[in-house]
Image (cartoon, rainbow, N blue to C red):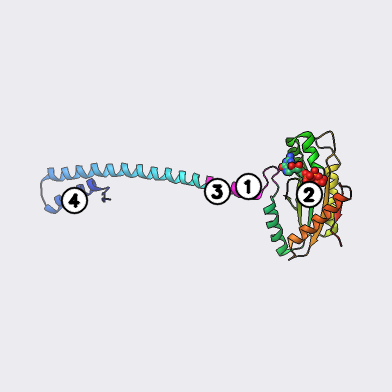
Amino acid sequence: MTDVDLFEAEAEALERANTVLASGTQELTRYRAALEELVQNYGQLMRQSRRLISRSDRTERELNQLNSRLKQLSDELEYKARHDNLTGALNRGAVFESAHRILEKSAMSVIVLDIDFFKRINDEFGHPTGDAVIRELVNRLRVALGDVGLIGRVGGEEFSILLAGMALDEAVVLAEHIRQAISGELFPCLPSRPVTSSFGVSWSVAGGDFEDAYARADEALYQAKRGGRNRVEREAA
Ligand SMILES: Nc1nc2c(ncn2[C@@H]2O[C@H](COP(=O)(O)OP(=O)(O)OP(=O)(O)O)[C@@H](O)[C@H]2O)c(=O)[nH]1
């Protein structure tokens, strides 16, 4: 690539003016011509500089806009990677990651719940109604929990609630409260029959193994299903 001198014309005008000055000539017309050439080139230089500055301002504004859009997209991507898109609850991966993080610092209770006979709801009322039931159920979990706990969707119609620092007895009472919040009032999307869920609750000491705590809660959930559903069971003592 050849080097292009952006200021070639201006440099030449300057050189000619310097030559006139250095010659010590008394000729007014030569001074005048050199000055005119300098004025003309100086004006052009100013116009070009203004154009360049405004173009670089525009480019900077565009770059800033692109940067904030990029940040927005990367936040959206991060959100989607950690959340279930039907309900906005944490997805399975994020539940396990969050649980490990909590257990590094504190004890934790975990509630797992599963909608009863959900297959029948799908079969009798269709998949979209099934989806609406799942969304409504998560809304009820949110209302019942307030700002306590982390809600996750760990499977199709199976959910978990992580309760950092909460004792087992307290978590069992909370699970019972949630059970009633779900079964106590008909879902507007399924007005012809109640939706119920079964619950299993376990507790883990700080530093404990979440897979183990989850398996114990899952076993308690299985007992709740076997015991007739729409009930809360705690882990075996
Ligand atoms: N509508 C809908 N259905 C789902 C989704 N994910 C899983 N399912 C359905 O959930 C149903 C789960 O059925 P099962 O595992 O047999 O359990 P169940 O009918 O709830 O019975 P119990 O758990 O024993 O009370 C299956 O029919 C799945 O197709 C979803 O995102 N939307």
Determine if residue 218 is in view: yes
Highlighted range, magenta: 69-88
State the residue in front, 236 or 74. 236
Ligand 1 in which quarter: top right
In this rendering, the answer to whether 100 lies above or below 135 is below
Where is residue 70 shown, x and y percent of the image? 53, 47
Q: Which residue is mark 3?
A: 71
* Gap in angstroms between the C-alphas marked 3 and 4: 51 Å
Mark 1, mark 3: which one is toward the viewer? 1
Where is residue 23 shown, x and y percent of the image? 11, 52
State the residue in front, 31 or 49. 49
**Judging from the image, what secondary structure is the residue with disc 3 in?**
helix
**Judging from the image, what secondary structure is the residue with disc 1 in?**
helix
* Left or right: where 33 falls relative to 89: left
Q: Which residue is mark 4?
A: 15
Mark 2, mark 1: which one is toward the viewer? 1
* Gap in angstroms between the C-alphas marked 1 and 4: 64 Å
Q: Residues within 10 Å of mark 3 (few under 14, many from 20)?
A: few
* Gap in angstroms between the C-alphas marked 4 and 2: 81 Å
